[in-house]
Amino acid sequence: MTTAVQAVPLRAPLARSGVRAARRGLGKLAAAILVLVAAASVTFFAQLLVPGDRATAILNQQTGRAQRWSAADLAPVNHRFGFDRPLLVQYANYVAGLFRGDLGTSYTQHRPVTEVIGDELVPSLVLTVAALVTAWVIALAVILLTAKRNRFVSAIGSTWEALTASLPPYWIGVVLLVVFAVELRIFPVIGGTGAPGTVLPVLALAIPLAGFLGQVTRDEFEKVLDQPFVITARTRGMSDTAVRLRHALRHSVLPAITLSGWALGALLSGAVIAENVFGRPGIGQVLVVAVNTRDVPTVSGIVLVVAGVYVIANLIVDLAYTLIDPRLRAS
Amino acid sequence: MTALSLAPAALRLRVRPATALSLLIVALLVVAVLAPGVLTSRSPNEIDLQHTLLSPSLSHPFGTDDAGRDLYTRVVYGARESFGIGLGATALAMVIAVLLGFTAGLARGIVDTVLTRILEVAFAFPVLLLALLLIAIRGPSLATEIVAVGIGSAPGYARMVRGQVLHVRQAGYIQSSVALGHTWWAVIRQHLFPNAMRPLVAMLTLAVGQSIVWASGLAFLGLGVAPPSPEWGALLDAGRVSITTSPWLEIMPGLVIVLATLALTALGRTLQHRLEGAAR
Protein backbone atom coordinates (compact mmCIF):
# COMPACT_ATOMS: atom_id res chain seq x y z
CA MET A 1 0.00 0.00 0.00
CA THR A 2 2.52 2.57 1.11
CA THR A 3 4.78 1.92 -1.84
CA ALA A 4 1.94 2.49 -4.31
CA VAL A 5 1.04 5.78 -2.63
CA GLN A 6 4.63 6.95 -2.85
CA ALA A 7 5.13 5.86 -6.44
CA VAL A 8 2.42 8.07 -7.95
CA PRO A 9 3.65 11.55 -7.03
CA LEU A 10 7.25 10.54 -7.74
CA ARG A 11 6.76 9.49 -11.36
CA ALA A 12 6.08 12.89 -12.89
CA PRO A 13 9.15 14.74 -11.53
CA LEU A 14 11.33 11.75 -12.41
CA ALA A 15 10.21 11.88 -16.06
CA ARG A 16 10.81 15.62 -16.16
CA SER A 17 14.26 15.25 -14.64
CA GLY A 18 14.96 12.55 -17.25
CA VAL A 19 14.24 15.01 -20.06
CA ARG A 20 16.38 17.61 -18.33
CA ALA A 21 19.23 15.12 -17.97
CA ALA A 22 18.98 14.22 -21.66
CA ARG A 23 19.07 17.89 -22.65
CA ARG A 24 22.04 18.43 -20.36
CA GLY A 25 23.77 15.44 -21.95
CA LEU A 26 23.20 16.79 -25.48
CA GLY A 27 24.50 20.19 -24.44
CA LYS A 28 27.64 18.58 -23.04
CA LEU A 29 28.10 16.58 -26.25
CA ALA A 30 27.84 19.75 -28.36
CA ALA A 31 30.35 21.50 -26.10
CA ALA A 32 32.73 18.53 -26.41
CA ILE A 33 32.55 18.64 -30.22
CA LEU A 34 33.21 22.39 -30.11
CA VAL A 35 36.30 21.85 -27.95
CA LEU A 36 37.61 19.28 -30.45
CA VAL A 37 37.03 21.59 -33.44
CA ALA A 38 38.82 24.37 -31.55
CA ALA A 39 41.67 21.99 -30.75
CA ALA A 40 41.89 21.07 -34.44
CA SER A 41 42.03 24.77 -35.30
CA VAL A 42 44.97 25.18 -32.94
CA THR A 43 46.90 22.29 -34.52
CA PHE A 44 46.04 23.53 -38.04
CA PHE A 45 47.31 27.04 -37.45
CA ALA A 46 50.29 25.64 -35.55
CA GLN A 47 51.36 23.99 -38.81
CA LEU A 48 51.54 27.41 -40.44
CA LEU A 49 54.16 28.43 -37.87
CA VAL A 50 56.74 26.06 -39.37
CA PRO A 51 59.59 28.39 -40.32
CA GLY A 52 60.23 28.80 -44.06
CA ASP A 53 58.47 27.20 -46.99
CA ARG A 54 56.82 23.91 -46.05
CA ALA A 55 57.25 22.26 -49.48
CA THR A 56 60.98 23.08 -49.39
CA ALA A 57 61.25 21.61 -45.89
CA ILE A 58 59.48 18.41 -47.01
CA LEU A 59 61.74 17.99 -50.07
CA ASN A 60 64.87 18.65 -48.01
CA GLN A 61 63.73 16.12 -45.44
CA GLN A 62 63.02 13.56 -48.16
CA THR A 63 66.36 13.95 -49.95
CA GLY A 64 68.47 14.69 -46.89
CA ARG A 65 69.72 17.91 -48.52
CA ALA A 66 69.40 21.56 -47.57
CA GLN A 67 68.92 23.54 -50.75
CA ARG A 68 66.50 25.77 -52.67
CA TRP A 69 64.20 24.02 -55.10
CA SER A 70 62.85 25.22 -58.42
CA ALA A 71 59.16 26.05 -58.78
CA ALA A 72 58.76 22.96 -60.98
CA ASP A 73 60.07 20.74 -58.14
CA LEU A 74 57.92 22.41 -55.50
CA ALA A 75 54.65 22.41 -57.47
CA PRO A 76 53.82 18.68 -57.11
CA VAL A 77 54.57 18.77 -53.37
CA ASN A 78 52.42 21.86 -52.92
CA HIS A 79 49.64 20.19 -54.84
CA ARG A 80 49.92 16.90 -52.98
CA PHE A 81 49.62 18.50 -49.55
CA GLY A 82 47.09 21.09 -50.72
CA PHE A 83 49.40 24.05 -49.95
CA ASP A 84 48.43 25.63 -53.29
CA ARG A 85 44.84 26.12 -52.17
CA PRO A 86 43.52 29.17 -50.32
CA LEU A 87 44.15 29.01 -46.58
CA LEU A 88 40.46 28.93 -45.69
CA VAL A 89 39.87 25.96 -48.00
CA GLN A 90 42.82 24.13 -46.40
CA TYR A 91 41.37 24.86 -42.97
CA ALA A 92 37.86 23.71 -43.93
CA ASN A 93 39.29 20.52 -45.44
CA TYR A 94 41.33 19.83 -42.30
CA VAL A 95 38.38 20.23 -39.94
CA ALA A 96 36.01 18.34 -42.26
CA GLY A 97 38.60 15.57 -42.59
CA LEU A 98 38.56 15.22 -38.82
CA PHE A 99 34.91 14.11 -38.90
CA ARG A 100 35.77 11.53 -41.58
CA GLY A 101 38.62 10.24 -39.44
CA ASP A 102 41.27 11.86 -41.66
CA LEU A 103 44.14 13.60 -39.87
CA GLY A 104 46.14 14.76 -42.91
CA THR A 105 49.27 13.37 -44.57
CA SER A 106 52.63 12.74 -42.93
CA TYR A 107 55.44 15.00 -44.22
CA THR A 108 58.05 12.28 -43.99
CA GLN A 109 56.24 9.02 -44.68
CA HIS A 110 53.89 10.40 -47.37
CA ARG A 111 50.93 8.37 -46.16
CA PRO A 112 47.86 9.26 -44.07
CA VAL A 113 48.61 10.16 -40.45
CA THR A 114 45.86 7.78 -39.31
CA GLU A 115 47.84 4.98 -40.98
CA VAL A 116 51.07 6.10 -39.27
CA ILE A 117 49.37 6.12 -35.87
CA GLY A 118 47.35 3.06 -36.86
CA ASP A 119 47.69 0.11 -34.54
CA GLU A 120 50.17 1.94 -32.26
CA LEU A 121 47.28 3.56 -30.44
CA VAL A 122 45.96 0.26 -29.03
CA PRO A 123 48.96 -0.68 -26.81
CA SER A 124 49.09 2.92 -25.54
CA LEU A 125 45.43 2.88 -24.60
CA VAL A 126 45.81 -0.53 -22.92
CA LEU A 127 48.73 0.87 -20.91
CA THR A 128 46.79 4.00 -19.98
CA VAL A 129 43.59 2.28 -18.88
CA ALA A 130 45.52 -0.40 -16.95
CA ALA A 131 47.47 2.36 -15.20
CA LEU A 132 44.28 4.22 -14.27
CA VAL A 133 42.71 1.08 -12.77
CA THR A 134 45.93 0.18 -10.93
CA ALA A 135 46.26 3.72 -9.57
CA TRP A 136 42.72 3.54 -8.17
CA VAL A 137 43.37 0.16 -6.55
CA ILE A 138 46.59 1.42 -4.90
CA ALA A 139 45.02 4.72 -3.81
CA LEU A 140 41.94 3.07 -2.27
CA ALA A 141 43.96 0.38 -0.52
CA VAL A 142 46.24 2.99 1.06
CA ILE A 143 43.27 5.16 2.09
CA LEU A 144 41.25 2.30 3.61
CA LEU A 145 44.24 1.04 5.57
CA THR A 146 45.71 4.31 6.79
CA ALA A 147 43.23 7.21 6.80
CA LYS A 148 42.04 8.25 10.28
CA ARG A 149 43.87 5.43 12.03
CA ASN A 150 46.33 6.35 14.78
CA ARG A 151 48.54 9.35 14.06
CA PHE A 152 51.59 7.31 13.10
CA VAL A 153 49.79 5.12 10.53
CA SER A 154 47.96 8.09 9.03
CA ALA A 155 51.25 9.94 8.70
CA ILE A 156 52.79 7.02 6.80
CA GLY A 157 49.84 7.03 4.40
CA SER A 158 49.89 10.74 3.69
CA THR A 159 53.69 10.88 3.43
CA TRP A 160 53.60 8.05 0.89
CA GLU A 161 51.04 10.03 -1.11
CA ALA A 162 53.00 13.29 -0.95
CA LEU A 163 56.22 11.54 -1.98
CA THR A 164 54.81 9.49 -4.86
CA ALA A 165 52.61 12.29 -6.22
CA SER A 166 55.64 14.35 -7.19
CA LEU A 167 57.74 11.56 -8.72
CA PRO A 168 58.29 12.01 -12.46
CA PRO A 169 57.21 8.84 -14.37
CA TYR A 170 60.55 8.59 -16.18
CA TRP A 171 62.43 8.34 -12.92
CA ILE A 172 60.12 5.72 -11.37
CA GLY A 173 60.32 3.91 -14.71
CA VAL A 174 64.11 3.86 -14.58
CA VAL A 175 64.19 2.72 -10.93
CA LEU A 176 61.64 -0.05 -11.57
CA LEU A 177 63.56 -1.11 -14.67
CA VAL A 178 66.88 -1.26 -12.82
CA VAL A 179 65.49 -3.05 -9.74
CA PHE A 180 63.03 -5.53 -11.27
CA ALA A 181 64.41 -6.09 -14.76
CA VAL A 182 68.19 -5.63 -14.49
CA GLU A 183 68.94 -6.69 -10.90
CA LEU A 184 66.16 -9.13 -9.96
CA ARG A 185 65.39 -10.23 -13.55
CA ILE A 186 61.70 -10.73 -12.74
CA PHE A 187 60.54 -8.78 -15.79
CA PRO A 188 62.08 -8.37 -19.26
CA VAL A 189 64.21 -5.24 -19.93
CA ILE A 190 62.70 -4.70 -23.37
CA GLY A 191 59.07 -5.40 -22.59
CA GLY A 192 57.03 -5.67 -25.75
CA THR A 193 53.27 -5.52 -25.43
CA GLY A 194 52.67 -8.85 -23.65
CA ALA A 195 51.57 -9.13 -20.01
CA PRO A 196 55.07 -9.42 -18.43
CA GLY A 197 56.28 -6.38 -20.37
CA THR A 198 53.24 -4.36 -19.33
CA VAL A 199 53.59 -4.61 -15.54
CA LEU A 200 56.50 -2.19 -15.05
CA PRO A 201 55.27 0.59 -17.39
CA VAL A 202 51.83 0.35 -15.77
CA LEU A 203 53.37 0.74 -12.30
CA ALA A 204 55.56 3.64 -13.44
CA LEU A 205 52.43 5.50 -14.51
CA ALA A 206 50.13 4.29 -11.73
CA ILE A 207 52.30 5.07 -8.67
CA PRO A 208 52.44 8.87 -9.07
CA LEU A 209 48.76 9.01 -10.07
CA ALA A 210 47.81 6.86 -7.06
CA GLY A 211 49.59 9.38 -4.82
CA PHE A 212 47.67 12.23 -6.40
CA LEU A 213 44.25 10.50 -6.28
CA GLY A 214 44.99 9.48 -2.70
CA GLN A 215 45.74 13.05 -1.64
CA VAL A 216 42.44 14.25 -3.08
CA THR A 217 40.43 11.37 -1.62
CA ARG A 218 42.05 11.42 1.84
CA ASP A 219 40.83 14.94 2.64
CA GLU A 220 37.26 14.01 1.73
CA PHE A 221 37.47 10.64 3.48
CA GLU A 222 38.54 12.21 6.75
CA LYS A 223 35.83 14.86 6.52
CA VAL A 224 33.13 12.25 5.85
CA LEU A 225 34.18 10.17 8.86
CA ASP A 226 33.25 13.16 11.06
CA GLN A 227 29.77 13.53 9.51
CA PRO A 228 26.68 12.95 11.68
CA PHE A 229 25.44 10.08 9.49
CA VAL A 230 28.67 8.19 10.14
CA ILE A 231 28.16 8.58 13.88
CA THR A 232 24.57 7.39 13.41
CA ALA A 233 25.79 4.34 11.51
CA ARG A 234 28.31 3.60 14.25
CA THR A 235 25.67 3.89 17.01
CA ARG A 236 23.54 1.41 15.06
CA GLY A 237 26.40 -0.98 15.68
CA MET A 238 28.02 -0.94 12.25
CA SER A 239 31.63 -2.14 12.30
CA ASP A 240 34.46 0.25 11.48
CA THR A 241 35.32 -1.61 8.26
CA ALA A 242 31.71 -1.47 7.10
CA VAL A 243 31.49 2.25 7.87
CA ARG A 244 34.63 2.88 5.84
CA LEU A 245 33.56 0.72 2.90
CA ARG A 246 29.86 1.50 2.68
CA HIS A 247 29.62 5.11 3.79
CA ALA A 248 32.92 6.97 3.80
CA LEU A 249 34.33 5.51 0.60
CA ARG A 250 31.27 6.21 -1.52
CA HIS A 251 31.19 9.85 -0.54
CA SER A 252 34.88 10.51 -0.72
CA VAL A 253 35.67 9.08 -4.17
CA LEU A 254 33.50 11.60 -6.03
CA PRO A 255 36.10 14.42 -6.36
CA ALA A 256 38.76 11.97 -7.50
CA ILE A 257 36.38 10.42 -10.04
CA THR A 258 35.91 13.87 -11.58
CA LEU A 259 39.67 14.03 -11.95
CA SER A 260 39.85 10.63 -13.67
CA GLY A 261 38.94 12.18 -17.02
CA TRP A 262 41.80 14.60 -16.67
CA ALA A 263 44.02 11.77 -15.41
CA LEU A 264 43.42 9.73 -18.56
CA GLY A 265 44.77 12.57 -20.70
CA ALA A 266 47.73 13.07 -18.38
CA LEU A 267 48.42 9.32 -18.37
CA LEU A 268 48.51 9.24 -22.18
CA SER A 269 51.25 11.86 -22.18
CA GLY A 270 52.99 9.98 -19.37
CA ALA A 271 52.70 6.88 -21.56
CA VAL A 272 54.81 8.65 -24.20
CA ILE A 273 57.67 8.75 -21.70
CA ALA A 274 57.06 5.30 -20.19
CA GLU A 275 57.03 3.70 -23.65
CA ASN A 276 60.38 5.28 -24.36
CA VAL A 277 61.86 4.08 -21.05
CA PHE A 278 60.74 0.49 -21.57
CA GLY A 279 61.07 0.36 -25.36
CA ARG A 280 57.40 -0.54 -25.56
CA PRO A 281 55.65 -0.03 -28.93
CA GLY A 282 52.95 2.63 -28.94
CA ILE A 283 52.24 6.24 -29.89
CA GLY A 284 55.13 7.37 -27.68
CA GLN A 285 57.76 5.93 -30.01
CA VAL A 286 55.93 7.21 -33.12
CA LEU A 287 55.62 10.65 -31.54
CA VAL A 288 59.29 11.04 -30.64
CA VAL A 289 60.36 9.97 -34.15
CA ALA A 290 57.87 12.43 -35.64
CA VAL A 291 59.08 15.32 -33.46
CA ASN A 292 62.70 14.55 -34.36
CA THR A 293 61.95 14.52 -38.11
CA ARG A 294 59.75 17.64 -37.80
CA ASP A 295 56.77 15.69 -39.12
CA VAL A 296 54.23 18.25 -37.86
CA PRO A 297 51.05 16.59 -39.26
CA THR A 298 51.81 13.33 -37.43
CA VAL A 299 52.58 15.17 -34.17
CA SER A 300 49.37 17.22 -34.59
CA GLY A 301 47.41 14.06 -35.30
CA ILE A 302 48.62 12.34 -32.13
CA VAL A 303 48.00 15.49 -30.09
CA LEU A 304 44.44 15.63 -31.48
CA VAL A 305 43.79 11.96 -30.75
CA VAL A 306 44.94 12.47 -27.14
CA ALA A 307 42.79 15.62 -26.88
CA GLY A 308 39.89 13.54 -28.21
CA VAL A 309 40.44 10.85 -25.57
CA TYR A 310 40.57 13.56 -22.91
CA VAL A 311 37.34 15.17 -24.11
CA ILE A 312 35.46 11.86 -24.40
CA ALA A 313 36.70 10.69 -20.99
CA ASN A 314 35.56 13.95 -19.40
CA LEU A 315 32.19 13.66 -21.10
CA ILE A 316 31.71 10.15 -19.69
CA VAL A 317 32.86 11.24 -16.21
CA ASP A 318 30.52 14.22 -16.35
CA LEU A 319 27.51 12.09 -17.29
CA ALA A 320 28.43 9.38 -14.78
CA TYR A 321 28.73 12.00 -12.08
CA THR A 322 25.22 13.24 -12.79
CA LEU A 323 23.97 9.68 -12.40
CA ILE A 324 25.86 9.08 -9.15
CA ASP A 325 24.90 12.36 -7.46
CA PRO A 326 21.13 12.96 -7.87
CA ARG A 327 21.43 16.55 -6.61
CA LEU A 328 23.11 17.53 -9.90
CA ARG A 329 20.19 16.19 -11.92
CA ALA A 330 17.71 18.49 -10.21
CA SER A 331 19.75 21.66 -10.61
CA MET B 1 77.07 32.35 16.27
CA THR B 2 74.56 32.26 13.46
CA ALA B 3 73.22 28.94 14.64
CA LEU B 4 72.64 30.34 18.10
CA SER B 5 70.85 33.45 16.90
CA LEU B 6 68.75 31.41 14.47
CA ALA B 7 67.58 28.84 16.99
CA PRO B 8 65.08 30.97 18.96
CA ALA B 9 63.56 32.31 15.74
CA ALA B 10 63.15 28.77 14.43
CA LEU B 11 61.44 27.73 17.65
CA ARG B 12 59.10 30.69 17.54
CA LEU B 13 58.06 29.84 13.98
CA ARG B 14 57.64 26.13 14.88
CA VAL B 15 59.56 24.86 11.86
CA ARG B 16 58.67 21.24 11.20
CA PRO B 17 61.53 18.86 10.37
CA ALA B 18 60.21 18.37 6.82
CA THR B 19 60.23 22.13 6.27
CA ALA B 20 63.73 22.44 7.71
CA LEU B 21 64.95 19.69 5.38
CA SER B 22 63.29 21.37 2.40
CA LEU B 23 64.90 24.68 3.33
CA LEU B 24 68.30 22.98 3.54
CA ILE B 25 67.87 21.36 0.11
CA VAL B 26 66.72 24.62 -1.49
CA ALA B 27 69.62 26.47 0.17
CA LEU B 28 72.10 23.94 -1.27
CA LEU B 29 70.49 24.34 -4.70
CA VAL B 30 70.77 28.12 -4.49
CA VAL B 31 74.47 27.77 -3.64
CA ALA B 32 74.87 25.39 -6.62
CA VAL B 33 73.23 27.94 -8.90
CA LEU B 34 75.18 30.97 -7.65
CA ALA B 35 78.57 29.49 -6.76
CA PRO B 36 78.92 25.83 -7.86
CA GLY B 37 82.63 25.92 -6.99
CA VAL B 38 81.76 25.99 -3.28
CA LEU B 39 80.18 22.52 -3.39
CA THR B 40 82.81 20.73 -5.45
CA SER B 41 86.52 21.05 -6.15
CA ARG B 42 86.37 19.32 -9.54
CA SER B 43 85.47 20.73 -12.94
CA PRO B 44 82.34 19.46 -14.74
CA ASN B 45 84.26 18.87 -17.97
CA GLU B 46 87.35 17.23 -16.48
CA ILE B 47 87.81 14.07 -18.58
CA ASP B 48 89.58 11.14 -16.89
CA LEU B 49 89.77 8.12 -19.17
CA GLN B 50 91.35 6.00 -16.42
CA HIS B 51 88.17 6.15 -14.36
CA THR B 52 85.20 5.82 -16.71
CA LEU B 53 81.77 4.50 -15.65
CA LEU B 54 82.68 4.02 -11.97
CA SER B 55 79.74 3.29 -9.72
CA PRO B 56 79.11 5.68 -6.79
CA SER B 57 81.89 5.66 -4.17
CA LEU B 58 83.37 7.99 -1.56
CA SER B 59 85.58 9.85 -4.04
CA HIS B 60 82.81 9.98 -6.66
CA PRO B 61 79.53 10.10 -4.70
CA PHE B 62 77.38 9.92 -7.86
CA GLY B 63 79.85 7.81 -9.90
CA THR B 64 81.49 8.82 -13.18
CA ASP B 65 80.25 8.89 -16.78
CA ASP B 66 81.67 7.33 -19.98
CA ALA B 67 84.34 10.05 -20.19
CA GLY B 68 85.31 9.67 -16.53
CA ARG B 69 83.72 13.00 -15.57
CA ASP B 70 82.48 13.21 -11.97
CA LEU B 71 78.68 13.02 -12.09
CA TYR B 72 78.20 14.85 -8.76
CA THR B 73 80.19 17.81 -10.08
CA ARG B 74 78.19 17.81 -13.30
CA VAL B 75 74.91 17.77 -11.38
CA VAL B 76 76.10 20.71 -9.25
CA TYR B 77 77.12 22.72 -12.32
CA GLY B 78 73.93 21.76 -14.15
CA ALA B 79 71.76 23.36 -11.47
CA ARG B 80 72.17 26.84 -12.97
CA GLU B 81 70.80 25.91 -16.38
CA SER B 82 68.04 23.71 -14.96
CA PHE B 83 66.85 26.45 -12.63
CA GLY B 84 67.17 28.98 -15.43
CA ILE B 85 64.80 26.88 -17.52
CA GLY B 86 62.45 26.38 -14.57
CA LEU B 87 62.37 30.08 -13.66
CA GLY B 88 62.07 31.20 -17.29
CA ALA B 89 59.17 28.84 -18.00
CA THR B 90 57.43 29.79 -14.75
CA ALA B 91 57.84 33.51 -15.44
CA LEU B 92 56.36 33.10 -18.91
CA ALA B 93 53.50 30.95 -17.60
CA MET B 94 52.73 33.50 -14.87
CA VAL B 95 52.73 36.49 -17.24
CA ILE B 96 50.26 34.69 -19.53
CA ALA B 97 48.22 33.48 -16.56
CA VAL B 98 47.99 36.95 -14.94
CA LEU B 99 47.02 38.61 -18.24
CA LEU B 100 44.33 36.03 -19.04
CA GLY B 101 43.14 35.55 -15.46
CA PHE B 102 42.81 39.26 -14.67
CA THR B 103 41.15 40.03 -18.01
CA ALA B 104 38.60 37.27 -17.50
CA GLY B 105 38.02 37.99 -13.82
CA LEU B 106 37.69 41.76 -14.22
CA ALA B 107 35.71 41.91 -17.48
CA ARG B 108 33.31 39.09 -16.60
CA GLY B 109 30.37 38.67 -19.01
CA ILE B 110 31.10 37.66 -22.59
CA VAL B 111 34.89 38.20 -22.35
CA ASP B 112 35.05 35.90 -19.34
CA THR B 113 32.94 33.25 -21.09
CA VAL B 114 35.13 33.33 -24.21
CA LEU B 115 38.39 33.19 -22.22
CA THR B 116 37.08 30.37 -20.02
CA ARG B 117 36.16 28.42 -23.18
CA ILE B 118 39.64 29.00 -24.60
CA LEU B 119 41.17 27.72 -21.37
CA GLU B 120 38.91 24.66 -21.59
CA VAL B 121 40.31 23.92 -25.05
CA ALA B 122 43.84 24.43 -23.75
CA PHE B 123 43.22 21.87 -21.01
CA ALA B 124 42.56 19.24 -23.68
CA PHE B 125 46.27 19.48 -24.59
CA PRO B 126 48.48 17.84 -21.95
CA VAL B 127 51.56 19.98 -21.15
CA LEU B 128 54.04 17.47 -22.55
CA LEU B 129 52.19 17.04 -25.86
CA LEU B 130 51.76 20.78 -26.40
CA ALA B 131 55.48 21.15 -25.75
CA LEU B 132 56.27 18.37 -28.25
CA LEU B 133 54.07 20.04 -30.88
CA LEU B 134 55.97 23.31 -30.41
CA ILE B 135 59.32 21.54 -30.64
CA ALA B 136 58.22 19.76 -33.84
CA ILE B 137 57.37 23.16 -35.32
CA ARG B 138 60.35 25.26 -34.17
CA GLY B 139 62.99 22.55 -33.75
CA PRO B 140 64.59 21.66 -30.41
CA SER B 141 66.43 24.51 -28.65
CA LEU B 142 66.75 26.02 -25.20
CA ALA B 143 64.34 28.86 -26.09
CA THR B 144 61.76 26.48 -27.53
CA GLU B 145 61.96 24.33 -24.41
CA ILE B 146 61.32 27.29 -22.09
CA VAL B 147 58.48 28.64 -24.26
CA ALA B 148 56.96 25.17 -24.65
CA VAL B 149 56.88 24.43 -20.91
CA GLY B 150 55.74 27.99 -20.14
CA ILE B 151 52.82 27.98 -22.58
CA GLY B 152 51.90 24.41 -21.68
CA SER B 153 51.53 25.10 -17.98
CA ALA B 154 49.96 28.59 -18.29
CA PRO B 155 46.26 27.55 -18.60
CA GLY B 156 46.18 25.87 -15.18
CA TYR B 157 47.59 28.95 -13.47
CA ALA B 158 45.33 31.26 -15.49
CA ARG B 159 42.31 29.44 -14.12
CA MET B 160 43.58 29.88 -10.56
CA VAL B 161 44.28 33.60 -11.09
CA ARG B 162 40.78 34.09 -12.50
CA GLY B 163 39.27 32.34 -9.48
CA GLN B 164 41.30 34.53 -7.14
CA VAL B 165 40.26 37.74 -8.90
CA LEU B 166 36.57 36.75 -8.81
CA HIS B 167 36.93 35.90 -5.13
CA VAL B 168 38.83 39.02 -4.05
CA ARG B 169 36.73 41.52 -6.01
CA GLN B 170 33.76 40.65 -3.79
CA ALA B 171 35.65 41.60 -0.65
CA GLY B 172 34.34 44.47 1.46
CA TYR B 173 37.53 46.56 1.21
CA ILE B 174 37.32 46.54 -2.59
CA GLN B 175 33.74 47.74 -2.51
CA SER B 176 34.49 50.44 0.04
CA SER B 177 37.46 51.56 -2.01
CA VAL B 178 35.22 51.87 -5.07
CA ALA B 179 32.59 53.67 -2.98
CA LEU B 180 35.25 56.14 -1.79
CA GLY B 181 35.61 57.19 -5.41
CA HIS B 182 39.06 55.76 -6.19
CA THR B 183 39.71 55.17 -9.88
CA TRP B 184 39.44 51.55 -11.00
CA TRP B 185 43.13 51.52 -11.85
CA ALA B 186 44.06 52.58 -8.32
CA VAL B 187 41.75 49.93 -6.85
CA ILE B 188 43.29 47.22 -9.01
CA ARG B 189 46.87 48.33 -8.31
CA GLN B 190 46.55 48.91 -4.57
CA HIS B 191 43.99 46.36 -3.46
CA LEU B 192 42.96 43.79 -6.03
CA PHE B 193 46.35 42.84 -7.47
CA PRO B 194 48.28 42.37 -4.19
CA ASN B 195 45.45 40.47 -2.53
CA ALA B 196 44.64 38.26 -5.50
CA MET B 197 48.32 37.45 -6.08
CA ARG B 198 49.27 36.62 -2.49
CA PRO B 199 48.23 32.95 -2.52
CA LEU B 200 49.86 32.61 -5.93
CA VAL B 201 53.27 33.57 -4.56
CA ALA B 202 53.37 30.21 -2.82
CA MET B 203 52.37 28.54 -6.06
CA LEU B 204 55.39 30.05 -7.81
CA THR B 205 57.74 27.78 -5.84
CA LEU B 206 55.64 24.77 -6.77
CA ALA B 207 55.56 25.89 -10.40
CA VAL B 208 59.35 26.18 -10.66
CA GLY B 209 59.73 22.58 -9.47
CA GLN B 210 57.05 21.41 -11.87
CA SER B 211 58.67 23.23 -14.79
CA ILE B 212 62.01 21.58 -14.03
CA VAL B 213 60.29 18.18 -14.13
CA TRP B 214 58.59 18.92 -17.47
CA ALA B 215 61.80 20.25 -18.99
CA SER B 216 63.79 17.24 -17.82
CA GLY B 217 61.08 14.97 -19.24
CA LEU B 218 61.55 16.61 -22.64
CA ALA B 219 65.31 16.29 -22.35
CA PHE B 220 64.89 12.64 -21.36
CA LEU B 221 63.15 12.08 -24.70
CA GLY B 222 66.17 13.67 -26.40
CA LEU B 223 64.20 16.83 -27.26
CA GLY B 224 65.57 19.32 -24.74
CA VAL B 225 69.04 20.64 -24.01
CA ALA B 226 71.60 18.46 -25.84
CA PRO B 227 73.93 16.12 -23.86
CA PRO B 228 77.39 17.73 -23.60
CA SER B 229 75.71 20.23 -21.26
CA PRO B 230 75.48 19.22 -17.57
CA GLU B 231 71.83 20.42 -17.45
CA TRP B 232 69.88 17.80 -15.46
CA GLY B 233 67.63 16.72 -18.30
CA ALA B 234 70.63 16.48 -20.62
CA LEU B 235 72.37 14.23 -18.05
CA LEU B 236 69.30 11.94 -18.12
CA ASP B 237 69.37 11.93 -21.90
CA ALA B 238 73.09 11.04 -21.96
CA GLY B 239 72.67 8.27 -19.39
CA ARG B 240 69.83 6.51 -21.20
CA VAL B 241 72.02 4.40 -23.48
CA SER B 242 73.77 2.72 -20.56
CA ILE B 243 70.71 2.30 -18.35
CA THR B 244 71.21 -1.46 -17.88
CA THR B 245 74.97 -1.32 -17.28
CA SER B 246 75.50 1.99 -15.42
CA PRO B 247 72.10 2.86 -13.91
CA TRP B 248 73.54 5.53 -11.56
CA LEU B 249 73.96 7.86 -14.58
CA GLU B 250 70.17 7.89 -14.73
CA ILE B 251 69.17 7.39 -11.11
CA MET B 252 71.40 10.03 -9.47
CA PRO B 253 70.44 13.09 -11.60
CA GLY B 254 66.83 11.87 -11.41
CA LEU B 255 67.07 11.68 -7.62
CA VAL B 256 68.34 15.26 -7.48
CA ILE B 257 65.41 16.41 -9.67
CA VAL B 258 62.99 14.53 -7.40
CA LEU B 259 64.51 16.01 -4.22
CA ALA B 260 64.51 19.52 -5.69
CA THR B 261 60.85 19.18 -6.71
CA LEU B 262 59.83 17.69 -3.36
CA ALA B 263 61.63 20.46 -1.44
CA LEU B 264 60.11 23.20 -3.61
CA THR B 265 56.64 21.65 -3.32
CA ALA B 266 56.89 21.27 0.46
CA LEU B 267 58.10 24.86 0.82
CA GLY B 268 55.33 26.11 -1.44
CA ARG B 269 52.72 24.28 0.65
CA THR B 270 54.13 25.64 3.94
CA LEU B 271 54.23 29.14 2.49
CA GLN B 272 50.64 28.75 1.31
CA HIS B 273 49.46 27.75 4.80
CA ARG B 274 51.37 30.65 6.37
CA LEU B 275 49.95 33.18 3.91
CA GLU B 276 46.43 31.86 4.33
CA GLY B 277 46.90 31.98 8.09
CA ALA B 278 48.13 35.57 7.84
CA ALA B 279 45.13 36.56 5.75
CA ARG B 280 42.74 35.15 8.36
Image (tube, helix red, strand yellow):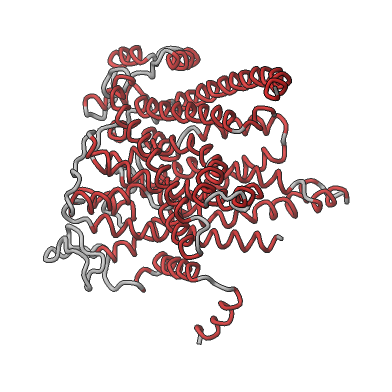
x, y percentage for residue B117?
60, 30
For the point 82% across and 47% down, the residue is: B183
Residue furthest to the left: B50
Position above or below: A185 against B36: above
Q: Is residue A122 left or right of residue A218?
A: left
Relative depth, front residue between A64 and B203: B203
Residue furthest to the front: A1
Relative depth, front residue between B46 and A4: A4
x, y percentage for residue A267?
40, 38
x, y percentage for residue B187?
78, 50
Residue furthest to the bottom: B1
Position above or below: B218 against A294: below
For the point 23% across and 39% down, the residue is: A197
Residue A117, picture quadrant: top left
Residue furthest to the right: B180
Relative depth, front residue between A227 and A241: A241
For the point 52% across and 48% down, the residue is: A244
Name the quarter where the N terminus of chain A is drawn.
top right
For the point 63% across and 22% down, the residue is: A21
Q: Is residue B1 left or right of residue A104?
A: right
Q: Is residue A273 left or right of residue A145?
A: left
Residue B155 makes an appearance in the image: no
x, y percentage for residue A184?
18, 53
Relative depth, front residue between B77 and A191: A191
Name the quarter where the C terminus of chain A is drawn.
top right
Q: Is residue B176 left or right of residue A90?
A: right
Residue B39 makes an appearance in the image: yes
